[in-house]
Each structure stands twice: as structure tokens, then as C-alpha cells.
Amino acid sequence: MPTLRDVGTAAGIAGGVVAAGLAYAHLETKLFRVRRVTVPLLPAGQRPIRVLHVSDLHLTPSQRTKQAWVRSLAELEPDLVINTGDNFGHTQALTPLLDVLGRLMDVPGAFVMGSNDYHAPTPKNPARYLLRDARVHREDKVPLPSDKLAEAFTAAGWVDLNNHRGLVELRDGRTIGLVGMDDPHLDLDVMPAPGRVPGEEDAVLRLGVVHAPYRRVLDQLKDDGVDAIIAGHTHGGQLCLPWFGALVTNCDLDRKRASGLHGWPGPRPDREGGEDSTWLHVSAGAGTSPYAQVRFACRPEATLMTLTARVR
């Protein structure tokens, strides 16, 4: 029979393991990386297009390491920037946000909003994140200056895709058709009316953009005929296990597509069985709630997507 001393030793070891795990999980929130993927979806003969996908910054004024990293993303020299929302992590984050995104806003771009662009984060039971639908409906929400953020983005030339269609012109003169929706996590999504914007008939491709990749929204964008869908929101699961992956996605998307490049609704279009699928990229994002600053086996990221000509 184990003695009290044995039990105490085991408890001490377990406590040490938990403490070490939490310490690493907090450290991982600062281990930023750029994920690089190649997507063969342009018409034959087209030159590559470099798309920088930024999502879920959850930026606060005190996050100097994250701010420096976001500034450095301009050095990737993308042709297009797609921002899929949840930029704010604090009520006073507008000024640092516009500062760190400043050089990227000189690049053609488009954006949608996430729930954390509308309302400030609030303390909540972190265990709720492990539920399939972790939404918390509160009456005391603190509004964020989302209108000022949108005004700054549009003033820089970025296309507002919150329940809108749009067209973006790259610096080399090529155009990309766009369709997007406001945040499905807040049930703000409304699929824009069918049709094309003037000039879209000459676009080299069409992209669907949304913050939270709920299945209903992915289906609508696919049915609209987009060549690829770009989304964020999931944080890649935020808490992942080796060989298992994300524990949850914080929406009804399956865990296997919590982050990275996939097909929707089936395999990737360049693989057997993927003929009727659309490309789907989900960003693991670059931040966390300021009240749950941990990530495990899921480093914060932005993605540089190199779009190339299709091989078939």
C-alpha cells in the first residue's frame, strides 16, 4: 500500500508537470511563425500571387513582442492582404493596431469583422472553451471602436466584405473578385445577393472571406462559386494534443480542419475525390483572449499563401 509520503511525492510531481505545462503554454503565445502554403488555383499561364492571411490578433497595447512581429510581416511583400477579424484584445488597442498594420495597409487588401472587433473581451470560465459552442451572451458588453477600424481600413483602400461583394486590383493590374460575410459567431452573417460586381468578369479568381468557418457559411460560399474560402476564428484549437490535434474549433467545423489548408466539403481539389470541393484555408491566428493567454502545440501564426497556376 502506498504511504502518505508516496502520495505526497506523486502529487508534487503531478503539480510540477501541470505548472511546467502552463508555463510553456503561456510562452508559446509568443512563439510567432509564418505558415507558408502553395495553392494551385489560378488559370493556366498566370504568375503567382502572394496572399498574406492575418487573423485573430487580439492585440493589446502591452504586447510589444506581438506588435513587432506584426510589423515585420510587411517584409514578406505580399500582393494582397486578407484580414479575417478579431483584431482587438483591449478597449485601447485601436492606435497600436493601426500602427502595426500600417505598412500592410499600403498593400491591396480586404477584411471582415469578428466578434472581438465589436465587443471587448470579458473574463469567463476557461472551461467553456471546451464546449462545442462556447458563445456567452451578455448584456453588459463593452463596445469597441469597430467603426473607426473599418474606416481606417477602407480609407487605406481595403475592401469591406462584411455581407458585401467587392473587387480588388493588385499592383500589377490583375483583379480578384471577393465575397464575404459578417461574423457568423454572432449570427451577423448575411449572404450577399447573387450577382457580380462591375469588372469581376475579368478577375483571375474569386475568394470567399469570413471570420468564423461555420458549415452553413462555407456551404453558401462554395455554392457561390468561389475558388477558395479564407477564414479564422478557431485559433487552430488553441489547445492541441500531439497526434490528436485540436480539442475543439469553437464552431461546428470538424477538428481536422481547425487550421491549415483543406478542401470543403470533401478532400482538397488537387486530390482524388476533391473534384467537387473548394479550397479552404483556416488560420490558427496570432492571439488569444487576454484572460486565457495560453496556447499548446498550436503556435500563433499568419499565413503566406502563394497562389499558383492549376496543373489540371
Image (cartoon, helix red, strand yellow):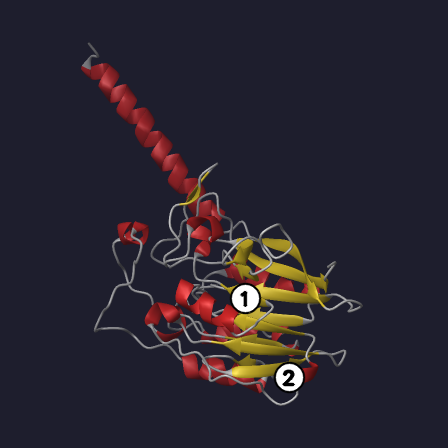
Residue depicted at x 27% and y 53%: 128
**Count of picture labels:** 2
Q: In which quarter of the image is residue 79?
A: bottom right
Q: Report x, y in % for residue 101.
A: 57, 71
Would residue 257 be seen by someone viewing this image from the given angle? yes
**Given contact means CB atoms under 8 Å apart, are the residues at marks 2 and 1 in contact?**
no
Residue 204 shows which numbered tag? none
Secondary-structure class at tag 2: helix
Is 72 situated left or right of 219 in this image?
Answer: right
Q: Earlier in the sequence, mark 2 or mark 1?
A: 2
Residue farthest toward the right in the current orientation of the protein: 45
Image vertical order of residue 248 relative to residue 197, above or below: above
| Extreme-top residue of the structure | 1
Amino acid type, mark 2: Glu
Circle 2 is placed at which residue position?
200
Q: Which amino acid does label 1 sit on?
A: Ile
Residue 157 in the image, given as x and y percentages of width and height: 60, 84
Residue 229: assigned label: 1
Please identify the quadrant where the C terminus is shown.
bottom right
Q: Is residue 283 above or below residue 106?
A: above
